[in-house]
Amino acid sequence: MTPINTLRALVAAFPLAALAVPALAEIKDYEFRLVQSELKQGNGVVVAVQLVDKRSGKPVPDAVIFAQRIDMAPDGMETMASPIEAMPSTEPGTYRFKTNLTMAGGWRLSLGAKVQGETGTLENKLILKAVP
């Protein structure tokens, strides 16, 4: 094969090779979603979220959640925060937290996580409502 024919063969094959490679995920392809957006006000409330791959809709297990905070920012009281602690998961891709929703109203759950096999940090802010 002459060099010119080799070059033509490579140029012709390259687009086909690119199609055979699966699309790589990015951190923006993941998000946390509330399992329930309305919870009963009180102490020891369990807030559950699911980490989802937005491309497939499938849950993503084994993320490392390194930051969590819950506060009343939606009602203009960002400084009104409650303690929050991670709890064991009951199913893959679902992450649970125990907290005190001391007042009825809007609450913001802020999460920071590392997804296994991905670079970057996933950060989501989810809004939920505590009802009396």
Image (cartoon, rainbow, N blue to C red):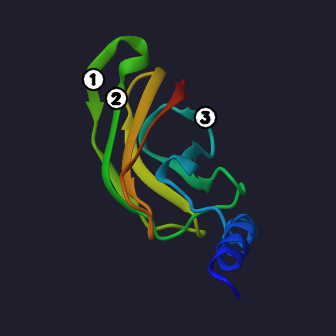
Q: At x 37% / y 29%, what residue is drawn?
A: 102
Q: At x 69% / y 53%, what residue is drawn?
A: 55
Q: At x 57% / y 68%, what residue is drawn?
A: 90
Q: Are marks 1 and 2 in contact (CB under 8 Å)?
A: yes
The CA distance from mark 3 to mark 2 is 15 Å
Q: Nearer the viewer, residue 18 or 123?
A: 18
Look at mark 1 in the image and give the residue it sits on: 80
Q: Where is residue 77 in the image (x, y as percent from the top left)?
A: 31, 15
Quarter of the figure with the N terminus: bottom right
Quarter of the figure with the C terminus: top right
**Tag 1: amino acid:** Met
Q: Which of 90 and 21 is in front in this view?
A: 21
From the viewer's perspective, is 78 left or right of 96? left
From the viewer's perspective, is 132 left or right of 54? left
Would you call the spot at circle 2 few (<14 residues within 10 Å), some (14-19), or many (20 or more)? many
User: Residue reaching furthest bottom?
Assistant: 1
User: If you read the primary sequence from the N terminus, does the residue marked by circle 1 or circle 2 appear first?
Assistant: 2
Look at mark 2 in the image and give the residue it sits on: 71
Q: Indicate the secondary structure of the residue bearing disc 3.
A: loop
Q: Nearer the viewer, residue 19 or 127?
A: 19
**Tag 3: amino acid:** Ser
Q: At x 73% / y 75%, what residue is drawn?
A: 9
Look at mark 3 in the image and give the residue it sits on: 37
Q: Position of residue 108 (x, y in %)?
A: 42, 29
